[in-house]
Image: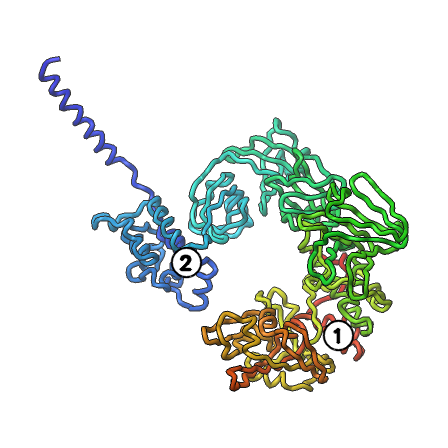
Amino acid sequence: MNKKTFIGFIVGIPLLVLILIIIILVNEPEPEGISRGVAYKSAALLLTDRENCEKMLTDHNQDYFPEKEQNKWYAKYMNYLYAGGYLDPHEIPAKSDTAEGFLTYKEAESLAEALVPGSGKKIHESSKKQNKKLPADEWWYLYEELRQTLDKEGTVKVLDVLLYGTPTNVKTASAWTAYTSGGNFQFEGISLDSYIDWELKLLVKGNEIIALKEAVTDSITYKNVWLTTGTGGTFGVYLGAVERTFPLEASLGQPEDFANNIADISLKRGSLQKVTLKKKKISGKVLAVKEDSVEVEGYGSLKLDKDFKVYRLYGKFEERSVSDILVGYDIQDFVVAHGRICAALLVREFDAKSIRVLLMNTNFQSIFHPSVTLSAESGLSLSYGEKVVKVPPKAEVIIDTSDERLKDGRIVIAPLEKGDSIFVNSIQRSYGTPTYDGTIEVRKEADGLVLINELYLEDYLIRVVPSEMPDSYEKEALKAQAVCARTYAFRQIQSNTYSKYGAHVDDSTRFQVYNNLQAASKTEEAVRETYGKLLFYNEKPIEAFYFSTSCGHTTDGSIWGGDPAQFPYLDGSLLQDSRGVLNLSTNSDFEEFIKKKDYAAYDSGFPMYRWETTVTNRQLEEEITEVGSILNITVTERGVGGIVKKLRVEGSDGVMTINGEGQVRAKLGNKYMTITKLDGTLMKNFDSLPSAYIAIENQGVDDNNITTFHIYGGGYGHGVGMSQNGAQAMAKSGKNFEDILKFFYHDTEVREAEQSKE
């Protein structure tokens, strides 16, 4: 190589590299931007949720967008930011062209500064770049910084899900609805249609998708899905709320072999790769349902598969939850693979024929017992493991936590003669040593023994009704109580509150008091004569709340903070034939009402219809410690019928609000209180106010700087649903139990449980 050639080579290489760099820079694709609508939606969801954005627009009736664009998906989010001063409508006009265009560096910086002062500098650029679009990656990097400051409670979450469908493949779907393994979400402004049958990593708040963070893989397996019959060489698959159809190659099997089975189906890029059927089923009475296991009679406790599913097969098919597996019933089959339960199949409708009751200790202090003592007139049969042992008549059986017979977890005790009852000698009730029909199951738990009484629901009610209403009451009132108690029990069985212990309810006031008083012939007749009857509203059993005595007016279902529309049959009314409604929302109107001791109502002849008491600030300060010395108490919100929903307590160290009838009664009641009833008799040793139907008079401060409050009250109980004493008065006047129930539970119907069309 000569000298000139060498020099040319040395000079040419850098020049060639420079040319290549220029070519790469010129042809490099422009980074992907982010639309303003998506960015502003994500920002608004750091501050609030979708529902509040929609509500703000309704409440303030101010929409910044032109009328023809007000229904655009991004309008509510941008309106929220405009109204909050985070966006300037002069700089960012409220119109579609703006929302659908790309976010710029300048706009991102301005929004970040408005959300978290000082954060905008992270993307500050020179003036040349201010109006250029911001790459999407840079926005989401900034968003994470904003999220750490604005979302301290972690309401924005990252979820890994499998995407079942969108309106693209689910024709019945609402707009912008994504069906996933993590539930159904809205995905306004986000592109998801091309990711059906992918595993995705999503950024969500509530049921709204903020962003697709990552498309993880297109090789997925839908676990423990329900297969159905298809047509023309296809089979159906239920994925959550979505029914999909897949073509089936002959090499994978025949469609008729797939139908009505649980399976795992594997897909690659949406194409079916493998179907693994799971056909092994077991069935039996469910004895306990825990977070990670189900105990089935005859099979013991079986662990749940990580992707465990529950499907209802009768009536309309739907996916349900583990809480729908009812203890004490064999209305479900279980699909098992590799020693774990993959799915529960609800195959028969719940019939509420039996109930399992946790028996609390003496004085109803705990569900746990250190030991139990049992006997029966005819003797007992003890079943544990593979053994059945008989115990002689009247002989006592003592079981404690160290008992070897509990090594398999439980002992089932039954009387030797059918119809005999079991004495539980280790606990006491108001009438002495209680006896129980059915069987007693003793289970060992970490905190002690639990006793479960399993018996027919109707026999349970025979012991509930006298504990809730005196057997001296009119038969029709007792029948109304029986229907209420049956309806309440029906709902409680389904709620599965104590499923981990294998029970439905306990025997205390938390549910319905059971077997605290002995059954009487009249209450037994009331239960038998209403056999199977429940209260229904729109084909579903109602929440049949009841209480002792009204103040002349009941209230609605909102007193515990819920939406009254959820309980339309609990609307609140006067206890008069007219069933009218008084406006008692102001303190002056309610005070005038509650001071009328002779106001006509069904309950007006009962001592608790009106009552009075006094209390001092010093007494109240033992319970109310947050405000220093109490200076005044004012009712600031009343519900239907005048019941107190909010109290304002003013003190030397501040002000507080007491919310809800339960808290009002607990905070204002105290051990020093003497209550004077309507008939002049006194009630003492009562730590809570009888009701929250109260008016409060501040009687001033004495020489010892003690403030006295006089409370005028009425009724006994929460005031929702049926007044038991009101029912008694109605029965005495000649009304039958259906008349009584339809009065207290508006627009309901009394009929037998098997007529339910749920």
Q: Are marks 1 and 2 in contact (CB under 8 Å)?
A: no
Q: Quadrant of the N terminus?
A: top left
Q: Extreme top residue here?
A: 1
In the rendered structure, the answer to whether residue 512 lies left or right of residue 111 reads right
Residue topped by disc 1:
727
Task: Return the disc, 1 or 2, that comes first in the chain's sequence.
Answer: 2
Q: Residue at x 70, y 50 (%)?
A: 448
**Numbered badge on residue 47:** 2
The amino acid pointed to by label 2 is Leu
User: How are the residues colored?
Assistant: rainbow
Q: Position of residue 78 (x, y in %)?
A: 38, 59
Q: Position of residue 309 (x, y in %)?
A: 63, 43
Report the front residue among 92 and 612.
612
Q: Position of residue 642 (x, y in %)?
A: 59, 77
Secondary structure found at label 2: helix
Q: Circle 1: is it few (<14), some (14-19), or many (20+) Cα within 10 Å? A: many
Q: CA distance from mark 1 to mark 2?
A: 50 Å
